[in-house]
Each structure stands twice: as structure tokens, then as C-alpha cells.
Image: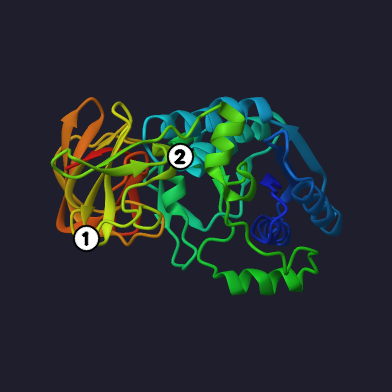
Amino acid sequence: MQKKVFVGMSGGVDSSVAAAILLEKGYKVEGISLILTENQEKEGISDAQAVADVLGIPLHVLDMRKEFAENVISNFVSEYRTGRTPNPCIVCNEKIKFGIMLEKSLEMGADFLATGHYAKIEEVEGCFELKAADSAKDQSYFLYRLSQHQLAHVLFPMADMEKADTRELARKYNLPVAEKSDSQEICFVPDDDYVKFLKDYAGVESVPGSFVNLSGEKIGEHKGIVNYTIGQRKGLGAFGEPMFVTRINAKTNEVVLAPNGYQQSMEFIVENLSEPIESEVELDVKIRFRAPRVPATITPIGNNAVKVEFKEPQRAVTPGQSAVFYNGDTVVSGGFISMQN
């Protein structure tokens, strides 16, 4: 029996090629696109429709502005209010793309939802494992919160492809987005100016406060905690030597600065794990998307949290970002960084 796949189509080259690949493999394919913000550019939907027309498939457009605001934007704003640095794509994947969009697709008769993400899913003894793609574009970091139910109904046709291969396939399939550039910005933040967005959207003001040193002594004035993130060097001012942001204290409205080296951490806490870790284990950990996987000891401390201890100190462990744990190429678990020592 021919399986039906809904493909999440953003209007980009990756999701467009994913749809073409699945058609070629014999699936019954339909597209699904999301309206996520009030000011969303129409280009993405227009491009998705153009691709759907070339491929000869229907395109469903869902208005999910309310759900996106409640699940993703509200979290983004609240995290910055508390001095943390969020990654909205991870929340969006869990709650929106592979949450509500997946359920809508299944309700409309799909067997699977597919996207243009670069990652792998393998079934091992009845369980579904998320694995890193053997590709420079590996995006497993952004997908670590997907549940067994979600993984069982998701396809990633891009798997181990490189971007150059994707564009070559787009040309082969005569897709109108073959040369379209990748989006590098947060999709709901105009011009990537998140400080302006926080002010305009949620009224989050950049309230000036104190730069302090490791002893708590005031050494300068900052422009508001939302302007800073752990490890930052640029835009701090002159202090006689290079200084780096090592901690942000929202309660006191202070930003702690220290010389080079103090932004390194040997251990930190991760909360709200995607999968429980019940005993001490040695795993590789990735503390941001572009960071390498490095070895660490993971120790449960209760309340679905663990302590992570590196073998070698790592730079700029940032509260609000995700730490993802790997056993080889397999994603074991992950959660949100809550503090550093």
C-alpha cells in the first residue's frame, strides 16, 4: 500500500528537495506550510507553492500564529528576561513542527511527516534512535527533544547529504528554489535584531546596570542584560585588558566580566532532560550547535537533572542553551543548561 507523506515545506531548498526525493521513491506526497508570525514574509509560502506546482502535489497552508506565539516566542522572551540565551529552533521543533504540525498531518491522513533536516532515524529492537547525519550539515542537535511517537512518524530524506548535493538535486528536479540562499536568522526576529524585537514585541527594555568583576566590584556600566551573552567580548568597552562576559545576574541587573580564561567551565547543570539518565555514564556532549562533541561524565542529581563534568574545560557554557548527549552518533538525551561553575 502506498504510504502518504506530508512534507513540511518552508520554501527553502532542503525541504523542496526532500519532497522531490520522496516522490521519486514512490510515496504519495503532499506539502504542508505554516504561517507562524503576523509579519511573516509571503516569500516562503509563495516559493513552497511554486515548488509544489512543479512537483504536481497539493500544498496545505496552516495558520499557526497563535500556537507559535504561545509556545516559542513567549519562551524566547521569558528566557531573555531572566538573563538566559534561548535557542528557539529547538522549542519550535519539539512543540510546533514535530508537535502540532505532525499531529495535524496524521489527522489529515498522513502516515509520516518529512522535513529537510539533516539527521537520521533508525529503528533498533522496536525503539527509534535519532542519529547524527554523516554530513557537515548535521542538525541532530536541534532535534534531540523528539519523542518515540514523533520519531516513529518522521522521515528525514536528506540524511547524509551535503548541501552541494542538495542543490545539484534541486537543479535536476528543476525546482525554482535551487539557488535560493539559506536563512541564517531567527525566523521571527526582523533583521536579526533581537534586542529591538524584545522591546517592540514584549516591551522588554534594556535597563542599564553594572558591570562587575569576579569579586562583585563595579567596574563599569552596561546597556541592559538582554544585550549580552556568556563568552561575549565585543561591545563591552575598555578595561585595560580583554574582558569577557562570564555570568549574567538578572535579579541584580549585573553582568560579570573576567579576563580571558575565566569563561572556561569544567562542570555545569542540565535540567528538563528529554530522556531520563538514571546512572552515571560517560558520553559526548555538545553545548551549542557549532560546538564539537566532547567527552564528559554525566551524573544524575534528581528532578530530571544531571551534572556534566568535562574532561577538559570548555568555553562559554551558556544558560538557556541546550546540552545534547551522544553515544557515538546516537542522541541519548539532552536538556537545558541552567548554571555553570
Work out whether mark 2 precedes mark 1 in sequence or the reverse, and give the earlier one.
2
Q: Which residue is mark 2?
A: 146
Residue in the foreground of this view, choosing between 266 and 195: 195
Residue 121: x %, y % from top left: 46, 51
- The C terminus, quarter of image: top left
Query: In the image, 323: left or right of 109?
Result: left
Q: How far, Cα to Cα, is label 2 from label 1? A: 37 Å
Tell whether 213 sits left or right of 121. left
Q: Which residue is mark 1?
A: 260
Based on the displayed image, in which of its 4 quarters is residue 171 positioned?
A: bottom right
- In the image, taking residue 286 as reference, residue 25 lies left or right, namely right
Judged from the image, the secondary structure of the residue bearing numbered disc 2 is loop
* Secondary structure category for the residue under label 1: loop
Mark 1: amino acid: Asn
Residue in the picture at 42% in, 41% down: 223
Check whether the beta carbons of the residues at disc 2 and disc 1 lie within 8 A of each other.
no
The answer to whether 207 is drawn above or below residue 298 in the figure is above
Q: What percent of the width, then of the height, locates residue 305?
A: 24, 32
Residue count near mark 1 (Cα–Cα under 10 Å), binned few <14, some 14–19, many ≥20: some
Residue at image location 57% in from the left, 57% down from the top: 184
Q: How is the image coloured?
A: rainbow
